Amino acid sequence: MSSGTAVANQGSFQDELNPFLAMAKRFDVASDHLGLDSGVREVLRTPDRELTVAIPVLMDDGSTRVFKGYRVQHNFSRGPCKGGIRFAPDVHLDEVRALAAWMTWKCSVVGIPFGGAKGGVICDPRELSITELERITRRYTTGIMDILGPDRDVPAPDMNTNEQTMAWIMDTYSMHVRRTTTAIVTGKPLSIGGSRGRAEATGRGVMISTREAMRTLGLDPHESRVVVQGSGNVGGIAALLLHREGYRITSISDMYGVLNNEKGLDMPAVLSYLKEHRKLEGYAEGEYSSDCNQLELDCEILIPAATENQITSRNVDNIKAKLIVEGANGPCTAEASQRLDQAGVMVVPDILANAGGVTVSYFEWVQDRMGYFWTEDVVNSRLEQTMATSFQDVSSVAKKYDVSMRIAAYILAIDRVARVYRLRGVFS
């Protein structure tokens, strides 16, 4: 292969990994099925607002560093924007744009009255103290303050942020507006307006999606091996709930490596060990490896619940699962998705499978605005109803248009947003 060809191939692969381009490809396919005109496509593809802020922070050693932060609000048509904030060293604007758009489609798929947004700060939380993280969070919040609000944009936790981060955001916003405003964020601690069931919601939604897909495929949970990439609030909770439902979890991973046991892992014990030791390495009832190609293991069900671009054109042909349930956002590239469709692998897409988190975030926002809070049983029951109904809605669209579940989810979501856009019209 010539050096020019190698460079071109590398460039093509980088395009494949661009999450915004992946979202746009799926958007175009779904829009073709709906027959959307070019003007509506342009409106729905284009983010409504993008903000980049500089975040000067006094570090613990007395020095000052300037971090960069983003907030992208993709679409306001159906209600306030909603979306998480992630802290990571590799955050970039195209990623945030894609995640904001995915949030629009995700909210639309499950029928909740939000548009999509996403935020990110370029930093490595592992290298920062708790006080430095608090200063970054508060200064970032101040920087994007003008576009936030319970009726405008409601952030939530995402990668490397948590309920403490949300508490700092809520406090910073509340101090600026001179009143306690609990509905400004979701994913908060219970003591300041959080919702019961919120921490487990995304993983629970993945479990419900898996169960509904298994029924569709006619597979027996007790004879199905499950491989879960990730062991946090999504992967860990999904694995635990599936274990309780009788599924055999044969593999789970953390950021350091993979824990395998073909006979099945005792998930309560695994998660208890992980909580105590902060890594899976050393757990006695399984084989741990730091160089295992986990996604390529033999299994019936694969749940990528870590980060984007895990299944690509370079490894998709080695995937052995019959069912993939996307716990993470964008774990399959567009090229990989096409090959999985051709191979007859059922994929429950991210904008459906991991929508449990934003659904219960909506429930939290509603409870904050009502000042009345539900029991965990009520939250879980309403989540169950929402996720199961949404799965059947997407499945019906897939049959109607003879398309994959992913494209069906996009068709359903885009159609709902486009209908609202047409009803509201263009303000000029």
Image (tube, helix red, strand yellow):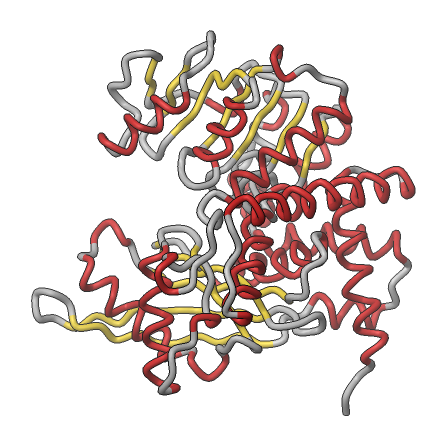
Residue at x 61%, y 64% (from the top left corner): 116
- Horizontal side, residue 190 vs residue 402: left or right: left
> Where residue 30 sits: x, y (%)?
81, 52
Residue at x 39%, y 53% (from the top left corner): 90
**216, 345: nearer the viewer:** 216
**385, 135: nearer the viewer:** 385
User: Split into 4 quadrants, where in the image is the C terminus?
Assistant: bottom right
User: Split into 4 quadrants, where in the image is the N terminus?
Assistant: top right
Which of the 4 image quarters holds residue 42? bottom right
Q: Is residue 386 visible?
A: yes
Count of numbered badges drawn on the protein: 0
In this view, the residue farthest toward the bottom is 428
Which of the 4 image quarters holds residue 275? top left
Residue at x 45%, y 20% (from the top left corner): 251
In this view, the residue farthest toward the left is 61
Residue at x 76%, y 39% (from the top left corner): 405
- Horizontal side, residue 148 vs residue 130: left or right: right
In the image, residue 88 above or below residue 203:
below
**66, 395: nearer the viewer:** 395
> Where residue 225 sits: x, y (%)?
56, 15
> Where residue 155 sits: x, y (%)?
48, 66
Which of the 4 image quarters holds residue 139? bottom left
Q: Is residue 11 visible?
A: no
- Horizontal side, residue 372 vs residue 333: left or right: left
